Image: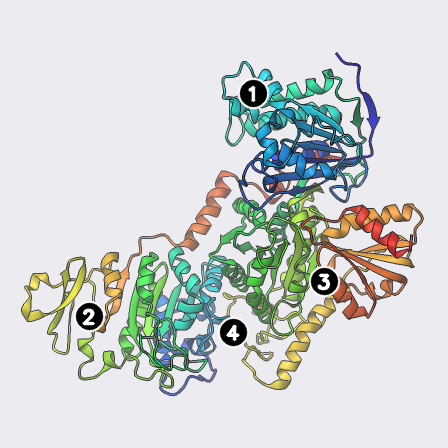
């Protein structure tokens, strides 16, 4: 038995997994995420995979990755440079070794470094032996050899045994990060044991053996000089689960239905990276959620609008090119003035672009991607868990104002995961007051008038089909207050102004923005949606370093919150980091006539904190 | 509400009808109102969804719930309305441009799903509202604003498409045959499942006389046949013509020239035959088929299956919203 490795306490650790797509990188990543979360850490993760389902094996194009950050404090992103990289083959190593922090650990499967595999990715000599990785702490482990030895007594082909290498690595990591091994053993039973959806006794046993072999390998070899322990993060008390943004949004559709008393309805069409939302939501039939997978994106939003017209709480889910297809119908919901929530999980554009990669590509499309003056509220989720709240809030506003609302998430937060404090249905806001269908019995002696409005919200009176005596016609032509088609010029002026005012009015009831840091100073960094984490982390560090920097996050991206202009005017300079070519910057410049600086990144990858810090320092002249 | 109060007038809105004088849509609206009377729902439980086009102004003229939507999408919107509230009697009113061009995708899939909708496809073989361009149903050689030298697109046969998509009710009429039009709207309105009713209409402005051959007082009867379930397929000005089988198809013959037993008998439940009937055209030597080409009540509707599935999953899994939110690995801080 080796001398016990030194136990070092760590505040946060960034781990990255890379391997062939189809090699289970997302699975092992999610397992470690869940393991850390169950152990009390805060976690944030980011999957990164190619758009091909089974890209050619052993090639750089086919590398699938998963990065995560675990910490003993609030974690806002999946981290900057990895402290630990697990790369399962030469392609994966070649793809990701350059990202690793200087001196960081690289764990790799030396059995996969065959001549052929190395030549395929252009390694002229073996990087594990030629000193090219000298700046890193490389652990070249013959994983196939060790796993096959551990499973020597099992009657299964070597290829199947080799697949157990992921749990072998989980064993090593479980030991390295001092995690509770029972949690992993429980996972294996849940996934493959007798009570699993598809029980596979042999796979359960093999993975258990491989996992234990990994644990023992960490403990008994002298390969690791240090192991790490990490305290639990200080987080709000409550029941937690780890959740992706897409799953959180799916739950919110169901929950908003329950809280509004309306049948929740999703009309949709499969599109990456939003499809997971529809997958999960399709399972909620027992909770009364209706999902219709339609023939195209247009039919997806159209059937949702039909369902809304008939009194359901309707959602449609999509990603960039799908939103483009839904354009005209979104305008229909807007001019009909019926509630609708459009969840858009943004991806790299334009057109098909980078389907599996993140980008804040659709802010301007969401703002202006409809004909006519067609403003609608836009809310941006700022973390995987926040996708629940953002979608729920969107449903509330859609009902209250009789308007379509766009929820912007993105590939990063849609597929990334973090712990989520699970609310009970009782704790969520009651949405029934916002439903408020027009019924004759509530208005004795009054005739129903379809575009008569609430004086505060400007929401129109809304009677759904089936309401006795309220039959009426609405349509996509301009109409007057009675719903009758009107080509009167002044009526169109008036209706256009009302539709805009309705959305503008929402700003008056939005919560005021809170500034992270001082209320005035040299630089204000503005985040929205998926950039929240990196900006929050960066601003916190800059403030800790004594810099005159503050941050704000826009949750409602349209309308702008009421105190935004005042905050902006309190700083010398404004920086907006965005995963696009400066879309919010454009809007802020137009609205506030301020010389906003844009930090733009369109590499299919979220910001790292250091990128924001470097830019701020440059602006500070430091 | 007592059935006796359900009259065509009861379904008429006070709005002024703005179709051109002589437009076929007037007669069709009358037929649809008849269908609604027969369907038996009070007007506040009826929803009409239309797309864009002359015929899509229809909902404004009906004293029901009405949704005048966007071009080509009425079928998808109506699908949402019906699934969201299956108690409603939902009618789709659409034209040939709306249904077979821009809305072609929704047209085939709404039929495939067999959603319990009443779908009236008003076919005037022209775009009227945009002032006279050819549609997918226009005839080869037809002159229009966008085909000044004649159409060179082969025309679509919407009912043949409907049958190939598994339609459970397929019927055809023409504006001039008012009684027949109402008859098919009554049958269609009562059919459980998607009822596809194609009604030929005359556009007096941009395609006047498009169906002249079929309605000619002297000879029209030689070019169309009114199908009756269980009856021999005989037609013509003097009932002198009939349909007989030829190979896998049908040919027209003189009654005098064939054995009586060889004359085909219409069977509404024969989908293969319906497909052939739906494709009959005078330029192939066959009469246009009117009446109910196909009707089958045995297929479950999508909207029924949606709720059956909800109930089945409720019975099997029975999770509450809280149960679902708390699934997976949870931990308490």
Q: Answer above or below: position of B183 versus A151.
A: below
**Mark in the foreground, 3 or 2:** 3
Q: Position of residue A191 (x, y in %)?
A: 57, 30
10 Å neighbourhood of mark 2: few (<14), some, or many (≥20)? many
x 14%, y 61%: residue: B245
User: Same subunit under labels 3 and 2?
Assistant: no
- Asked if one can make out residue A209 in the rendered structure from this viewpoint, the answer is no
**Mark in the foreground, 3 or 4:** 3
**Mark in the foreground, 4 or 1:** 1
**Which residue of the protein is positioned furthest toward the top in this rendering?**
A1
- Report the disc number at residue A583: 3
Residue bearing mark 1: A205
Element carrying mark 3 = helix
Question: Pointer 1 and pointer 3: residues touching (CB < 8 Å)?
Answer: no
Residue bearing mark 2: B286
Residue bearing mark 4: A472
x 37%, y 75%: residue: B7
Question: Pointer 4 and pointer 1: residues touching (CB < 8 Å)?
Answer: no
Element carrying mark 2 = loop
x 5%, y 70%: residue: B256
Q: Answer above or below: position of B3 versus A137.
A: below
In this view of the protein, which residue sits in the foreground, A318 or B11? A318
Element carrying mark 4 = loop
Q: Chain of mark 4?
A: A
Q: Position of residue A28 (x, y in %)?
A: 63, 33
Question: Pointer 4 and pointer 2: residues touching (CB < 8 Å)?
Answer: no
Q: Answer above or below: position of B234 versus A70.
A: below
């Amino acid at each position: 038995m080796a001398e016990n490795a030194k136990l070092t306490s760590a505040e946060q650790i960034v781990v990255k997994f890379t391997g062939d797509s189809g090699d289970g990188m997302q699975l092992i990543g999610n397992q470690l995420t869940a393991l850390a979360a169950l152990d009390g850490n805060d976690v944030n993760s980011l999957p990164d995979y190619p758009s091909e389902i089974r890209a050619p094996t052993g090639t750089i194009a086919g590398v699938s990755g998963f990065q995560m950050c675990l910490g003993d404090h609030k974690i806002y992103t999946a981290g900057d440079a990895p402290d630990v990289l697990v790369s399962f083959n030469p392609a994966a190593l070649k793809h990701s070794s350059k990202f690793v922090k200087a001196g960081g650990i690289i764990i790799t499967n030396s059995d996969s470094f065959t001549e052929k595999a190395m030549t395929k990715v252009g390694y002229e000599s073996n990087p594990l032996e030629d000193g090219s990785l000298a700046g890193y702490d490389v652990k070249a482990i013959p994983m196939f050899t060790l796993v096959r030895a551990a499973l020597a007594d099992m009657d299964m082909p070597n290829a199947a045994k080799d697949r157990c290498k992921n749990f072998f690595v989980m064993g090593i990591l479980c030991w390295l990060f001092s995690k509770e091994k029972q949690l992993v053993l429980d996972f294996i039973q849940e996934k493959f044991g007798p009570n699993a959806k598809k029980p596979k006794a042999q796979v359960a046993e093999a993975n258990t053996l491989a996992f234990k072999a990994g644990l023992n390998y960490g403990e008994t070899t002298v390969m690791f000089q240090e192991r790490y322990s990490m305290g639990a993060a200080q987080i709000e008390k409550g029941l937690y689960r780890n959740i992706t943004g897409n799953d959180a949004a799916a739950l919110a559709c169901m929950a908003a239905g329950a809280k509004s008393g309306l049948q929740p309805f999703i009309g949709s069409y499969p599109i990456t990276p939003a499809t997971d939302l529809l997958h999960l939501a399709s399972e909620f039939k027992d909770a009364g959620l209706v999902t219709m997978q339609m023939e195209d994106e247009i039919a997806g939003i159209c059937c949702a609008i039909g369902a809304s017209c008939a009194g359901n709480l309707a959602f449609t889910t999509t990603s960039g090119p799908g939103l483009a297809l839904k354009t005209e119908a979104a305008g229909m919901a807007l001019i009909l003035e019926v509630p609708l929530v459009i969840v858009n999980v943004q991806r790299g554009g334009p057109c098909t672009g980078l389907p599996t990669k993140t980008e804040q590509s659709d802010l301007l499309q969401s703002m202006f991607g409809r004909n006519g003056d067609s403003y609608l509220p836009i809310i941006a989720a700022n973390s995987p868990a926040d996708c629940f709240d953002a979608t729920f809030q969107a449903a509330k506003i859609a009902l209250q104002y009789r308007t379509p609302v766009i929820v912007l998430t993105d590939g990063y937060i849609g597929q990334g995961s973090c712990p989520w404090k699970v609310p009970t249905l009782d704790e969520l806001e009651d949405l029934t007051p916002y439903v408020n269908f027009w019924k004759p019995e509530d208005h004795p002696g009054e005739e129903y008038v379809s575009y008569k409005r609430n004086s505060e919200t400007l929401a129109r009176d809304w009677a759904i089909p089936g309401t006795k005596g309220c039959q009426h016609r609405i349509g996509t032509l301009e109409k007057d207050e009675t719903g009758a088609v009107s080509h009167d010029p002044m009526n169109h002026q008036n209706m256009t102004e009302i539709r805009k005012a309705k959305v503008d009015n929402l700003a008056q009831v939005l919560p005021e923005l809170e500034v992270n840091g001082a209320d005035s100073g040299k630089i204000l960094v503005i985040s929205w949606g998926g950039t929240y984490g990196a900006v929050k982390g960066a601003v916190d560090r800059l403030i800790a370093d004594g810099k005159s920097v503050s941050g704000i996050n826009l949750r409602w991206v349209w309308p702008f919150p009421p105190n935004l202009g005042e905050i902006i005017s309190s700083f010398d300079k404004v920086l907006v980091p965005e995963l696009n070519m400066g879309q919010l910057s454009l809007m802020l410049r137009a609205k506030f006539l301020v010389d906003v600086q844009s930090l733009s990144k369109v590499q299919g990858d979220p910001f790292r904190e250091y990128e924001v810090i470097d830019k701020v320092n440059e602006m500070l002249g430091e | 509400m007592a059935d006796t109060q359900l009259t065509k007038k009861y379904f008429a809105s006070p709005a002024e009808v703005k179709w051109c004088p002589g437009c076929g849509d007037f007669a069709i609206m009358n037929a649809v109102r008849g269908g609604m009377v027969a369907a038996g729902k009070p007007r506040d439980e009826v929803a009409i969804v239309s797309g864009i086009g002359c015929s899509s102004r229809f909902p404004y003229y009906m004293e029901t719930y009405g949704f005048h939507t966007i071009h080509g999408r009425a079928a998808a919107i109506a699908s949402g309305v019906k699934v969201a509230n299956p108690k409603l009697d939902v009618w789709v009113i659409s034209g040939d441009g709306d249904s077979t061009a821009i809305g072609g995708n929704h047209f085939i899939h709404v039929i495939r799903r067999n959603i319990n909708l009443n779908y009236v496809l008003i076919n005037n073989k022209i775009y009227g509202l945009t002032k006279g361009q050819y549609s997918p149903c226009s005839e080869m050689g037809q002159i229009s604003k966008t085909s000044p030298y004649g159409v060179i697109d082969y025309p679509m046969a919407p009912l043949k498409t409907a049958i190939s998509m598994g339609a459970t009710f397929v019927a055809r009429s023409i504006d001039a045959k008012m009684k027949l039009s109402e008859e098919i709207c009554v049958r269609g309105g009562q059919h459980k499942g998607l009822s596809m009713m194609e009604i030929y209409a005359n556009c007096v402005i941009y395609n006047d006389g498009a169906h002249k051959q079929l309605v000619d007082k002297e000879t029209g009867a030689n070019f169309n046949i009114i199908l009756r379930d269980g009856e021999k397929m005989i037609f013509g000005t003097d009932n002198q013509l009939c349909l007989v089988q030829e190979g896998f198809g049908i040919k027209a013959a003189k009654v005098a020239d064939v054995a009586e037993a060889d004359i085909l008998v219409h069977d509404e439940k024969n989908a293969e035959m319906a497909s052939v009937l739906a494709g009959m055209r005078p330029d192939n030597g066959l009469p246009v088929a009117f009446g109910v080409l196909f009707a089958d009540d045995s297929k479950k509707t999508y909207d029924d299956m949606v709720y059956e599935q909800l109930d089945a999953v409720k019975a099997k899994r029975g999770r509450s919203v809280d149960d679902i939110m708390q699934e997976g690995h949870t931990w308490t801080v």
